[in-house]
Amino acid sequence: MQDELIRSTIHSIRAGNPEYQIEAKRHLDSLTKPIGSLGKLEEVAAQYVSLREEKHPVIAGKAVYTFAGDHGITDEGISAYPKDVTPQMVYNFLSGGAAINVLARQAHSDVVVVDVGVDADFGGVQGLIDRKVRRGTRNFAKESAMTLEEVYAAMKVGIDLAAEAKQQGRTLIALGEMGIGNTTSASAIAAALTGVHATEVTGRGTGLDAERCNRKAQVIDKALQMHFPERATVVPDPLEVLRKVGGLEIAAIAGMVLGAAAQRIAVVIDGFICTAGAAVACALAPDARSAMFAGHLSEEPGHCILLERMKLKPLLQLDMRLGEGTGAVLAFNLIEASVHIYNEMATFESAGVSKAEK
């Protein structure tokens, strides 16, 4: 049985308002340009309008939420970096020196760093949101990564933060992550949810060579056979997927996607790991897609497979695979541009411009 908060959040999610979608298209077609000539920008504007249900849409309180957590699967030697890097990068985020900080400053966005499962004690360091559920997941090559109670607790972190974002007047947020070993977890989630073989969704992550990448895929494949012996014929329950092979930060991301959709806050998904969390959210509440924008297409092979399954089109393709929320924050500029076009561009009538002949 699902946790009551998670269940009520899922039940409160609605698809984008079709009346606002129709009105948005009508307005976009009336602007001084050939119909459809601004391509994806028009699609983005219409989606934002239908989600926010505003005739004159506003973007306010931009923020990127970077969730951090460690992974027991690193015991299997599947990462090029030691797990000590996770807390070290959290300190880097807090001091403003990471790529996400640079890009967020350029986009005039806040950076919110959340410890949901780092295997370290930060001692109340200033600026960190401490919502630690436990110090890292268990090694899913040998046992389930989490208990169901831990999955619920991590998801509720995201749901609660979405409610806080609503109270703070935020209308556009991005999601990012940090956690050594989390591409392995994301690959396992992707394979479990889609039914594809582990090799199809497993990439080099933080820079593995071919041999270690193959080793990583083998570890994932064996774990999937252990946890989901019937997955070839039965799609596993998404919460069970999180419990058995997920990550605490990925569960929190799934919860924040659900929470943002329920609050009708537009949420930009970053790369492969974030998309794994979003895919779990979509499996639980398909209408949550109405609130989602795919910031970019990662180099990780599983990312494309998940986006296609979720029917999301990435706004950017820059051959990135950093995480942190970097690709999502870059997409803020495109989303804002689409809203400015919607609000500020003249119509044929207001500008006295002749329309195309029928």
Image (tube, grey):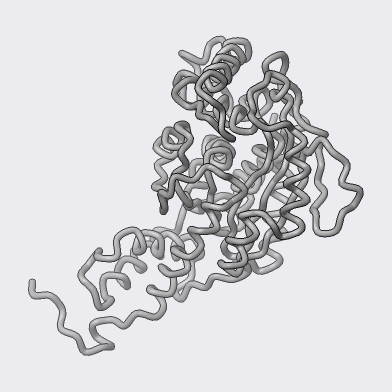
Image quarter hosting the C terminus: bottom left
- Left/right placement of residue 164 relative to residue 47 reads right
Quarter of the image for residue 149 reads: top right
Q: Position of residue 324 (x, y in %)?
A: 62, 48
Please indicate, yes or no, whether residue 355 appears anywhere in the rendered image.
yes
For residue 248, side relative to residue 318 (left or right): right
Residue appearing at x 53%, y 37% in the figure? 279
Q: Is residue 258 visible from the viewing direction of this image? A: no
Q: Quadrant of residue 319?
A: top left
- Which residue is at 46% across, 62% downward? 48
Q: Which quarter shows the N terminus? A: top right
Q: Quadrant of residue 99?
A: bottom right
Taking the spot 76% from the left edge, 56% from the top edge, the residue there is 94
Image x and y of residue 49, in percent: 44, 65
How far across and how far down the image is residue 240, in percent?
A: 64, 24
Furthest residue to the right?
A: 123
Q: Nearer the viewer, residue 220 or 88?
A: 88
